[in-house]
Amino acid sequence: MPSAPDSAPACEALFARARAVVPGGVNSPVRAFRSVGGNPRFVTSARGPYLTDADGREYVDLIGSWGPMILGHTHPDVLAAVSEAAGRGFSYGTPSENEVALAEEIVARVEPVEQVRLVSSGTEATMSALRLARGITGRSRVVKFAGCYHGHVDALLAAAGSGVATFGLPDSAGVPASAAAETIVLPYNDVAALEAAFDTDGEHIAAVITEAAPGNMGVVPPLPGFTEALRRITREHGALLISDEVMTGFRCSRAGWYGLEGPYAAGAPDLFTFGKVMGGGFPAAAFGAPAGLMAALAPDGPVYQAGTLSGNPVATAAGLATLRGCTDAVYAHLDHAAKTIADAAASALTGAGVPHTIQWAGSMFSIFITDRTVTNYDDAKTTNAPAYAAFFHSMLDQGVHLPPSAFEAWFVSAAHDDAALDRVLAALPAAARAASESFATIAP
Ligand SMILES: *Cc1c(COP(=O)(O)O)cnc(C)c1O
């Protein structure tokens, strides 16, 4: 087991090179390790449950590319499908059969969805779903929940303070106040706040968008009845409900979070967004709904939406092979692997005297270093970030790559076998002690 903490000269050299030509050295901010400190690992290859970095060190991967790698890295069936597709051309700019097959696979899994439009990223999916909802309702405002992430869409990059029914303030420079002003940000799991917002503003609200089960403030599942309330209240006011399943889709179950919690007595969400797993590690995402709603999209309807690489034949081949590989046995294994890790983490943290809460959405889980139950973003922010950073780096030094942020889900795959799980389990006690020591020296 490597012992020199954070010694990764080749990765450091690559990071220095990267910083010269890429802002912050990364193409997506969380990869820069800012919230845990230290230098990111530059990965040179990935197989099964493992990542190998430029220094030749191997890690058990608990990021899984933030969800897509549900079968493990370089799964032979997916690799074969991708190679076969690539051999027949990379992109046509015309329709092709793989797109149809992927759409059929999604529609077969998520009962309320009759049609999907394929796009290239989760951001595009939520952006397009929002435009569709606005086009259908003729209204402009949108409700989102603090701590929910829906990609970097201007109107959805508002998280605002924790005040009830605050109008969105941009969360990022470059988002005009006018874009965020149409966004109403509410605390998650708060039905009264939602009712109040609709009482004041209901006739202007096009849609409520929610993560089906939030995973982007750490895992914070909806409280019993919350999703039903979203459905009931939106319907009463003629607004649409957009369930963002970009992270949970095809991961929490065959039919995503909907498959675990639905069907709902109050009715299904109107629009769904998907990404991550359905691309199998390639750029493919989708938004979908009953055919009557999707008819509003061009070329049939007035809502414009398009994409040069949408439905790309290689990406759709990867997504299709991945979804077809997601059998009941795979979901059972994900549950087992996640529970094995979470149980061991809980006992290590308890043993080291570190307060913690483990929360679940299917096999997605995260560990908050806090003594409270986390039902919204304010609760999530009580997690002890320095203690998580200490925990993270201890795990990294011991060859386990956790998400480099305290506000992320941990992802397992079908390839996390006993050997990989044993490595994780062996690393946990020392990491829990590191968290405990940081706790002693840094006030939460
Ligand atoms: C990852 C994610 C997105 C954005 O997807 P990208 O492919 O990164 O643009 C949107 N919504 C949720 C819930 C996500 O987890």
Image (cartoon, helix red, strand yellow):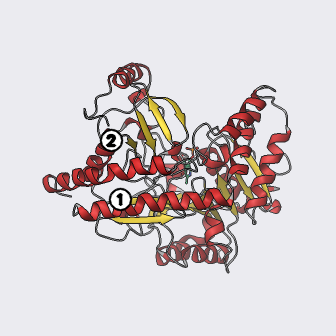
Q: Report helix, strand or loop for mark 1.
A: helix
Q: Quadrant of the C terminus?
A: bottom left
Q: Quadrant of the N terminus?
A: top left
Residue 274 placement (x, y as % from top left)? 65, 52
Residue 316 placement (x, y as % from top left)? 74, 40
Residue 122 placement (x, y as % from top left)? 61, 47
Up-down relation of residue 331 to residue 405 (above or below): below
Residue extending farthest left:
441
Q: Which residue lies under the disc numbered 2?
A: 398
Residue plotted at (24% across, 53% down): 435
Residue 345, numbered circle: 1
Residue 90 lies in quadrant = top right
Q: Nearer the viewer, residue 81 or 442?
A: 81
**Image mark count:** 2
Q: Nearer the viewer, residue 247 or 177?
A: 247
Residue plotted at (55% across, 50% down): 413
Camera sees residue 382: no
Up-down relation of residue 56 to residue 129 (above or below): above
Q: Nearer the viewer, residue 263 or 200?
A: 263
Residue type, numbered disc 2: Gln
Q: Are marks 1 and 2 in contact (CB under 8 Å)?
A: no
Residue 209 placement (x, y as % from top left)? 58, 61
Residue type, numbered disc 1: Ala
Residue plotted at (33% across, 41% down): 398
Camera sees residue 299: yes
Q: Report helix, strand or loop for mark 2.
A: loop
Residue plotted at (65% across, 54% down): 273
| CA gap, disc 1 and disc 2 | 15 Å
